[in-house]
Amino acid sequence: RPAFVGLANFARLLKDPGTTTVWLNTLLFVVATTAITFVLGLAWALMMNQSFKGRAFIRAASLLPWVLPSTVTAFLAAWILNGQYGVLNALLLTAGVIAEPVAWLAEEKGAMAAVILTKAWLSVPLFMAFFLAGLQGVSQDQVDAARVDGCENMGVLRYVVLPHLFPTMVIVTILGAMGNLQAFDVIYALTQGGPIKATTMLSVEVYKQAFQNWDMGTACAVGVLWFITIAIPTTFYLRILFKREA
């Protein structure tokens, strides 16, 4: 029979050292994934904004990782990183980079790197689409004027393109961080939060507490912590959105 325990679940959660580990895992995952996705998405958008033969096809093909179900991508990554028959080990062994197979997903750093890179690979097309849309609004007259003033490609990028894209960059970064804070399927399908708790994020911890340990009180407490963490970038996003509309 359910009994009211007040703030006991939150007190127990805050005393548990595992809570700090899970929260730091989440922070590392969000920062690293968002940063990698930002850099790759921007670089790919700049490439796709150039004129070359087959550009339309490559633009369309670039969206494939985003279109594929995330669990399918996670299982594909697990197959590539498998310690016994994975493609990555086979390539590295053939190239002489490693002397014996490496169990990538059984190591804490390897598992974290795997979930970060897999989620980033899934999100790059979305970031690319936003940045590419922003690049369509760059004035060609400003670009030509910058070149007349002596700017090379990097100068045009620094003084014309990036300032124009700055509002888009802010919005995309915040939305990306919010999405990464909610990531669950890729992480659980790839590592199930392991090894130990190396890749256990707040989303995974809520699932484990609720549906594996059947501890709904702790799951709700973790959920509140998760909500507060997500609310931080959401607040910045809403402030920027309302400021622009005003």
Image (cartoon, rainbow, N blue to C red):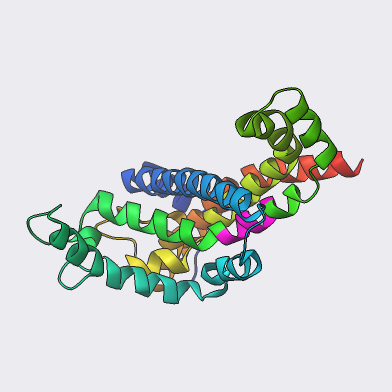
- In the image, is residue 237 above or below residue 64? above
- In the image, is residue 16 above or below residue 218? above
- Residue at 40 percent across and 43 percent down: it is 24
Q: Is residue 84 left or right of residue 146?
A: left
Q: What residue occupies the far right of the structure in this picture?
A: 246
Q: Is residue 77 left or right of residue 148?
A: left
The quadrant in which the C terminus is found is: top right
Front-lying residue, 71 or 4 = 71
- Residue at 50 percent across and 61 percent down: it is 183
Front-lying residue, 80 or 71 = 80
Q: Position of residue 97 (x, y in %)?
A: 15, 52
- Residue at 49 percent across and 69 percent down: it is 2
Q: What residue occupies the far left of the structure in this picture?
A: 99
Q: Is residue 228 visible?
A: yes
- Residue at 67 percent across and 55 percent down: it is 51
Q: Position of residue 204 (x, y in %)?
A: 42, 62
* Residue 110 falls inside the magenta stretch: no
Q: Position of residue 122 (x, y in %)?
A: 50, 63
Q: Quadrant of residue 127?
A: bottom right
- How many numbered callouts? 0
Q: Position of residue 178 (x, y in %)?
A: 60, 52
* Type of secondary structure dominating the magenta stretch: helix
Front-lying residue, 215 or 118 = 118
Give, as a single range, the part of the protein colored magenta: 125-131
* Residue 129 falls inside the magenta stretch: yes
Q: Is residue 199 left or right of residue 155?
A: left
Front-lying residue, 150 or 233 = 150
Q: Is residue 182 visible?
A: no
Q: Quadrant of residue 99?
A: bottom left
